[in-house]
Image (tube, rainbow, N blue to C red):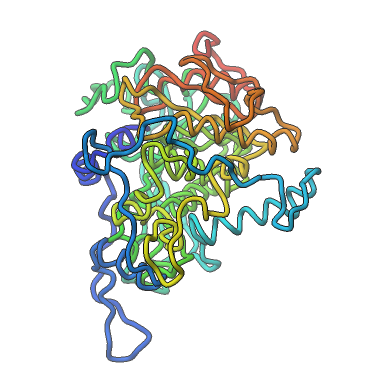
Amino acid sequence: MQGIANLIVGPGPIIALLALAMLPGAVFAQTAALATSEPGKTNTSSNWTAQQDHKNMMEQLGIVRLRPGPSGQPGATNSANYDPAKANPFPDFPDALTLKNGQRVTTAAMWWNQRRPEIVEDFEREVIGRVPKDVPKVTWTVVSNVTDGLVGNLTANGKRLLGHVDNSSFPAITVDIRMTVVTPAGAKDPVPVLMMFGGFGGDGMPRPAGSPVLTNRFPEFGGPFKDPPSTEQLLAAGWGYASINPGSIQADNGAGLTKGIIGLANQGRPRKPDDWGALRAWAWGAARGLDYLETDPAVDAKKVGIEGVSRYGKAALVTMAFEPRFAITLVGSSGEGGAKPHRRNFGEAVENLTGSGEYHWMAGNFLKYGAAEASFGSRNAADLPVDAHMLIALCAPRLTFISYGVPERGDANWLDQEGSYMATVAAGPVFRLLGARDIGEKEDYRVAKMPPVNSGLLDGELAWRQHDGGHEDRSNMKYFIAWANRFIKHATPDPAVAK
């Protein structure tokens, strides 16, 4: 389910706002003035604009001024850099296999017991934020179902679910997670399932047999495509899919940070600097969806993957890194905050993520790395203790597929495909240490060059493929399915689909 992500990446704020306005569940909780801990006073932060919330976080951190992010518009005075010669001002990434005390990590035990916890702590404190220890529980209810329905011309069973988050401690905020689960109608055994961050252009439910095919207002957005929709490719290969609506978990804007699951956990108050951002909240919601899938007899819960494109590609990578029960991920066109190194000066930059339009994805502390003037001086990407290759490494040794398209078809240079390849290469040593295979690149990440388009590196648990399509991963889906099937030992009912 890639439609919304196709619309809202990079330098297209108008399209982004239109897409968000049409996103089912984008407005899912309204709150009035909320009680504070001081009797007789109210807290109206729940109705702040993103700019007000952003300013509040800057004040908490002692930031006076942030550097503006580069523009994606060619010819702008602050246009993004696309000159490879200027792309690596900080060429050396933090070493994923060196402890903070300088000791080299040489065994899997050292990784699991020492180095991985260090990296997790740095990401939680400085980059994506911490999930509160007392997040309310989620209760799943099936609200409708279709038996022997149709997805394209394929027979499938579907269920719409609502995951109600217990708000008894703060009834002013309601969060109901929306998810659809669809499995092949003829499956005799539990099937692998790919959970997809979706919500735009429908929820993926099968239509009842005999009913007309629904028309899509954007039938070929990102196309034309050579392949069927990802949902049909999955079903034809004997997989199921789940579409989870991220907007029903947490709004995709700064004004929503005192609402949604983040606001509910904070009882309507603004975030502290190390509180979670939207990426981590969406990942939390996906994990709650997996809780349900573990109870579904039609699903092989040991073979559930997570997928997303663009900002939801970032969320898919965060989900895989921090929820070990997910076995597989397809990370589509994730860019800055995903597989793209923060230290790369190419396209989107750290300063874009620290601005008021995107800061809500990250922990408040992440703003420090865009600070030009602050009580602590100034910081930049080189001051981050971690980088994208370490986020990929946190997925090891599980199945991790990094996917991009080509700029000519709309997967803009803004995303930095080359830098994301460097990060994938740099994550390889961790996969190898844990007994998994990486993409097989022989060169150091500093000089490694992407293989030609449509030349996938798919022999290992860590995989890379740049397809010849646009800002979507539908064009890589058949390669993803064939790659995953080899490792999870799943036989597709129609071998031709996986070719």
> How many marks overall?
0
| Relative height, residue 242 to residue 153 (above, below) | below
Identify the image quadrant of residue 198.
top left
Q: Is residue 431 left or right of residue 362?
A: right
Residue 473 horizontal/vertical position (percent): 42, 26
Residue at 33% across / 49% down in the picture? 247
Residue found at the very far bottom of the displayed protein = 39
In this orientation, which residue lies closer to the viewer: 332 or 244? 332
In this orientation, which residue lies closer to the viewer: 10 or 66? 66
Residue at 31% across / 25% down in the picture? 410
Q: Is residue 114 left or right of residue 324?
A: right
Residue found at the very far front of the displayed protein = 85
Residue 223 horizontal/vertical position (percent): 29, 19
Residue 293 horizontal/vertical position (percent): 53, 42
| Relative height, residue 369 to residue 440 (above, below) | below
Q: Is residue 40 left or right of residue 119?
A: left
| Relative height, residue 167 to residue 301 (above, below) | below
Q: Is residue 44 left or right of residue 165?
A: left
Of the 4 image quadrants, the one containing the N terminus is top left
Residue at 49% across / 44% down in the picture? 343
In this orientation, which residue lies closer to the viewer: 292 or 411? 411
Residue 488 horizontal/vertical position (percent): 65, 27
| Relative height, residue 128 to residue 458 (above, below) | below
